[in-house]
Amino acid sequence: MLYIFGGLPGVGKSTLARRFARDLQAMHLRIDTIEHVLREAGYAVIGPEGYTVAYKVAVDNLQLGLNVVADSVNPLRLTRAAWRAAARQAAAPFVEIQVICSDVDEHRGRVESRVADIPGFTLPTWNDVIQREVEAWEPAPLVIDTAGKTPEQSGADLRRALDGLDWLLAFRLS
């Protein structure tokens, strides 16, 4: 199963994805980590390089029968379609999960108070976040709103929402 997480920086997406992957004992693919390592290796990351690496790694692991949690901003229809294509290539079901923080003040506070968990990684500013282009999700994803919630509460919301989707996931292969 491919769990495709997306959402703006600071909404709690990576915290939720990391906890979920740990609970599932799934592979966690984080685009920030991949892109940072590519930059450290001297590559200019100006486009889809990190995503392209992640798609291929996801397919390899899905074909082994492993669950994969994809963790990225995932702002474009193109990137979301590529994740779906990766799942289909591996003949694996998938679910798209958009993480949001509906409280703008809380979201801004999270962005402005974050500390990088990847050594040497430059975090986006609030201005970077609000200027980010995000295309509408089509089809509509499962939405998890982290506003006013602890990571544990958001994780419980995610598990409840996924429990209700089990019957639908079989149709995602077509």
Image (cartoon, rainbow, N blue to C red):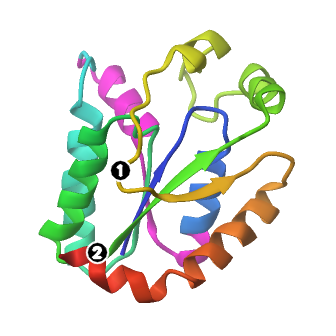
Front: mark 2 or 1:
1
Q: Residue at x 44, y 30 (%)?
A: 134
> Is 14 located above or below residue 113 in the figure?
below
| Residue at (76% x, 23% y) in the render | 108
Q: Amino acid at mark 1?
A: Glu
The residue lying furthest to the left in this view is 89
Q: Nearer the viewer, residue 124 or 122?
A: 124
Q: Is residue 112 toward the left or the right of residue 140 in the image?
A: right
x, y percent for residue 34: 36, 38
> CA–CA distance between discs 2 and 1?
14 Å
Residue at the bottom extreme, as displayed: 167
- Judged left or right of residue 124, residue 75 is left
**Residue 109, x across and y down, in percent:** 81, 25
Q: Residues within 10 Å of mark 2 (few under 14, many from 20)?
A: some
Which type of secondary structure does the marked residue at label 1 adopt? Answer: loop
The picture quadrant where one finds residue 27 is bottom left
User: Residue 172 has which mark?
Assistant: 2
Residue at the (24%, 23%) spot, across then down: 47
Badge 1 crowding class, 10 Å Cα cut-off, few under 14, some 14 to 19, many 20 or more, is few
* On-image quarter of the C terminus: bottom left
> Is 86 situated above or below 9?
below
Q: Amino acid at mark 2?
A: Arg
Q: Which disc number belongs to residue 138?
A: 1
The image quarter in which residue 37 lies: top left
Q: Left or right: 19 with respect to 57?
A: right
* Image coordinates for residue 65, horizontal then vertical, percent: 28, 82
Q: Which mark is residue 92?
A: none
Q: Position of residue 82 (x, y in %)?
A: 21, 49
The range drawn in magenta is: 22-43
